[in-house]
């Protein structure tokens, strides 16, 4: 990892701005498809998709030692009619993680490594403003050195406070609850919800769409992600698309920035494929895509049903892609290790304050 001056803010924006906005639109399209299935009376499909979603009771695990929840401002729609249940419109913060979980035979095969290990490879704080017409997506580099607070563990114990450790170690030692607590400790912002997607689910989504077509600008030769591609256009199935999203050692300087660039290409390819397949006109494929998405999700208990996910999606109907701002947490090279970064202050603190 090289320093901030070497990479520059423009490169960070180019890597992250357009793709993540489109990712939100893609998620909305899939969610809309789920709603169509439900409205059509597909009761068994609804039951199956609803039971696909896994959840973690983060509120119970963390207790009251957390930042306060934002106090919503009453809206006109909320007071206009006592009989109509208005959609939520208050500010909301969601921690979104992409996990390289090795649990399960398919995840282990796709990710390699110890089947008992898991890390958060991608981390984003999604902040929805009051009224939910503007959103800010903040990426936290996984190699950021942080102070990891004491966390509850799934076995019932607690971890010790750890100083100068990688951000993604929080998930590895304490799962979703520790990831949430670490982000809250860094930002002093309450995470209202948690969403995680894993390896196998991502690959299934690509396969459900019939693969994606991506053009690479340079040869990729990465034994660690098992990906070898000549520069040019390629149609990738789920396993190879996942390898493309994970590769870093076979491109550029081997840092996360090169991988982020490839991930954005992949996001655009996914969106192009979704548009081309006409999901809403193909119920069978729509169900297959929705099954892949819900089957890959782990959420907090406040979002662990199709009803709650649908309510969240409908509350975002006034949010356009142009109103979604994507940024990276300001960082500089760690003084102790050029392969790691630390938050650049006071810029990082000012960013978090703007979202409280």
Image: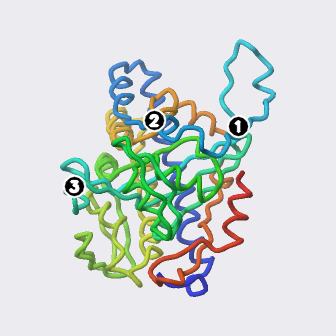
Q: Nearer the viewer, residue 60 or 40?
A: 60
x and y percentages locating residue 353 in the rendered image: 73, 58
Tag 2 secondary structure: loop
**Residue 70 at x, y percent in the picture:** 71, 40
User: Foreground mark, 1 or 3?
Assistant: 3
The residue at which mark 3 appears reads as 115
| Disc 3 element | loop
* Secondary-structure class at tag 1: loop
Q: Which mark is residue 90?
A: 1
Q: How many marks?
A: 3
Between discs 2 and 3, the one toward the N terminus:
2
330 relative position to 247: left or right: right
Q: Is residue 253 above or below residue 268?
A: below
Which quadrant of the figure has residue 40? top left
Real-space CA distance between mark 1 and mark 3, rounded to the nearest whole angstrom: 40 Å
Pick the front one: 63 or 291: 63
Residue reaching furthest top? 83
Residue sitting at x 68%, y 59%: 352
Say how the picture is coloured. Answer: rainbow
Circle 2 residue: 57
Label 2 – label 3 distance at C-alpha: 23 Å
Q: Earlier in the sequence, mark 1 or mark 3?
A: 1
Q: Is residue 142 left or right of residue 87?
A: left
């Amino acid at each position: 990892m090289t320093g901030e001056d070497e990479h520059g803010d423009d490169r960070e924006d180019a890597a992250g701005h357009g793709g993540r906005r489109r990712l939100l639109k893609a998620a909305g399209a899939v969610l809309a498809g789920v709603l169509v299935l439900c409205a059509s009376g597909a009761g068994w499909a609804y039951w199956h998709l609803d039971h696909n979603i896994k959840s973690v009771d983060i509120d119970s695990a963390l207790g009251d030692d957390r930042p306060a929840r934002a106090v919503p401002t009453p809206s006109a729609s909320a007071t206009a009619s006592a009989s109509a249940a208005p959609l939520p419109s208050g500010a909301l913060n969601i921690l979104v993680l992409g996990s390289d979980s090795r649990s399960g035979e398919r995840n282990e095969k796709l990710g390699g490594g110890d089947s008992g290990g898991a890390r958060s490879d991608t981390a984003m704080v999604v902040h929805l403003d009051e009224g939910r017409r503007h959103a800010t997506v903040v990426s936290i580099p996984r190699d950021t050195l942080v102070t990891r607070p004491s966390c509850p563990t799934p076995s019932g114990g607690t971890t010790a406070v750890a100083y100068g450790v990688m951000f993604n170690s929080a998930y590895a030692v304490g799962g979703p609850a520790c990831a949430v607590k670490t982000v809250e400790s860094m930002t002093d912002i309450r995470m209202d919800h948690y969403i995680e997607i894993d390896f196998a689910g991502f690959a299934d989504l690509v396969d459900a769409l019939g693969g994606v077509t991506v053009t690479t600008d340079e040869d990729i030769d990465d034994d660690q992600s098992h990906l070898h591609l000549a520069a040019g256009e390629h149609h990738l199935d789920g396993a190879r698309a996942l390898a493309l999203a994970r590769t870093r050692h076979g491109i550029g300087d081997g840092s996360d920035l090169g991988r982020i660039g490839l991930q954005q290409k992949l996001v655009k390819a996914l969106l192009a494929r979704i548009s081309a397949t006409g999901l809403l006109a193909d119920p069978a494929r729509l169900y297959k895509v929705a099954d892949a998405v819900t089957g890959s999700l782990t959420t907090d208990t406040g979002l662990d049903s199709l009803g709650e996910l649908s309510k969240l999606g409908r509350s975002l109907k006034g949010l356009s892609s142009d109103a979604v701002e994507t940024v990276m947490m300001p960082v500089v090279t760690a003084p102790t290790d050029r392969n790691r970064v630390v938050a650049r202050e006071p810029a990082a603190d000012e960013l978090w304050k703007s979202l409280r």
